[in-house]
Every structure is written in C-alpha cells, then in structure tokens.
Image (tube, grey):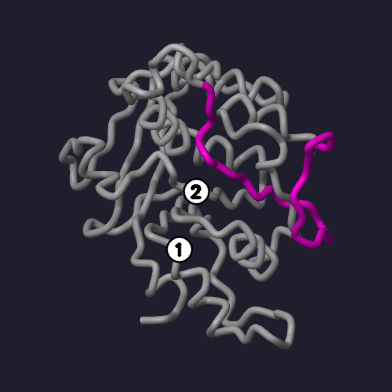
Amino acid sequence: MHSPHYLKPTDFRFTQNDRVVGTAEVFPGWSPADRLVVIAPDPTADLVRTAGLVLAWTQRFYDRPEARADGFYDYPSHYVVGGEAGAEPRVLGPSAEAWWSAAWCRLDVWPSIRHVVADPDPLPLLGAALMLEPTVLVWPARLSVPGSMALPPNLDDRNARRLLRARLREVWRYGDEPFGATDGWALAWCGGAAELTREALDRLGHVPRADAGLQACLERVEPDRFLGLA
C-alpha cells in the first residue's frame, strides 16, 4: 500500500466548463466497495490517459478514518483490461503477469489477479467488462460499443447488457480531445500523483519530459445510453 504515502486531495484538479469541481461532485456515488474497471487496449498509452482518474479514486479509498487506522490492510477493487492480440478475456495471477503488469501495480491496481487480458477490439473488451462486473467502467472514446455481444446460448445480448447494467453505476469515457461542454471534464494531476504516474511509465520504458503536464479528457456517460438500453 505505497500510494497513501504519495497521494493528497490537492494533487487532482477537475474542471468542467472552466469551473473547478470538487471530488464530492465528481464522484457523488463513490463507495470504498466500488469495482473500477479500466479498459486499456494499449496498456502504455492508456495508462497515461487514465492514471489520474485511477489515482483520484485510489486517494479517496485511502482518505478514510478506517484506512488510516493501525492494522488496516486492503487495496481498492480496481481492475485493468489490457489489450493482447487474439486473447480471449482471461484473468492473470496469482503467479502470472503481463509485460505491463508492474506499471499498473505502481498505480495500486494490484495484485495481478486484478489484471485481465483481452483482444483489443470492442467485443472482447466489453465481454471482459461483463466478466468483471464493474460498478464504474472507464472506456476509451476511440472505440465504439459493439452492437451485439457474442455469448453462450443461455445468455442473449440484451440480458447480458442488463446484467452488466444491474451493477454499473457510472461510465467514464476518455480520449485525447476535449468532450462536449455538458458532460466533458478535464483532469490535471500533479504532486505525488504525478510522481506515481511517472514511476509507472518508467517501468514501461516510457518516461515523459519532466516538464510535461499530466492531463486527461473525460466524459461521464449514462450507463443506459452507453449500453444502448435507453
């Protein structure tokens, strides 16, 4: 549990329409029991795009009286699905890991039993999300949501989406360009959060310039709209 020694609430700056927004408004339904699933078809580039959001959730997890008490030991239920060409969705660990595992562990997405590989196409990635039953899903905006899911005969596409929706409270999309004014957010992170991000990238051999800012473009989407159930 190294991240509590790095992270502070002031490391994160969320803005919407140039208005600085507090984390209570950004994460209104947050719970320490949240299952956060990050879909990362490119585990290196997508770490850069999503690290701030993951670490903001992590900071909230550890910024509780019970988490600061003597004898506390727990990790947030955060998962990453990394792209691997041709792979059926499968969970790694406890003794297996991917080439990118050490970097994501540095973000406290740990241990590797919380690392999943899947072919980096929308259909297997959505199947991996169904398998992990997230309460919060973080999805790349560059990938469309598949129109139907190929599933066993006893679970049709609509019921699969309804099953996923039953647990899903929030969907965040991330990209390289700002989203619309209504649902678009910007996140910048610094301090210990930036240090952890750079340490994670160092494990991938991808170190940004020391003066490069760490920023993300985000959009919060209604789960029904995302899943095509609206």
- Decide which of tag 2 and tag 1 comes sooner along the chain: 2
Residue at the spot 48% in from the left edge and 20% down from the top edge: 72
The residue lying furthest to the front in this view is 71
Q: Quadrant of residue 217?
A: top left
Reading the image, the residue beneath label 1 is 167
Reading the image, the residue beneath label 2 is 35
User: SS for tag 2?
Assistant: strand
In the rendered image, residue 79, in percent from the top left (x then y), is placed at: 59, 44
Residue 157 position (above or below residue 199):
below
Disc number at residue 139? none
The magenta stretch spans which residues? Answer: 73-97
For disc 2, the neighbor class at 10 Å (few under 14, some 14 to 19, many from 20) is: some
Residue at the spot 32% in from the left edge and 42% down from the top edge: 186
Majority SS type along the magenta span: loop
Which amino acid is tagged 2? Arg
Which amino acid is tagged 1? Arg
Residue 15 position (above or below residue 153):
above
Residue 23 belongs to magenta span: no
In the rendered image, the quadrant that contains the C terminus is bottom left
Residue 78 position (above or below residue 39):
above
Q: Are marks 2 and 1 in contact (CB under 8 Å)?
A: yes
In the rendered image, residue 69, in percent from the top left (x then y), is placed at: 39, 15
Q: Quadrant of residue 20?
A: top left
Given residues 94 and 100, the one toward you in this image is 94
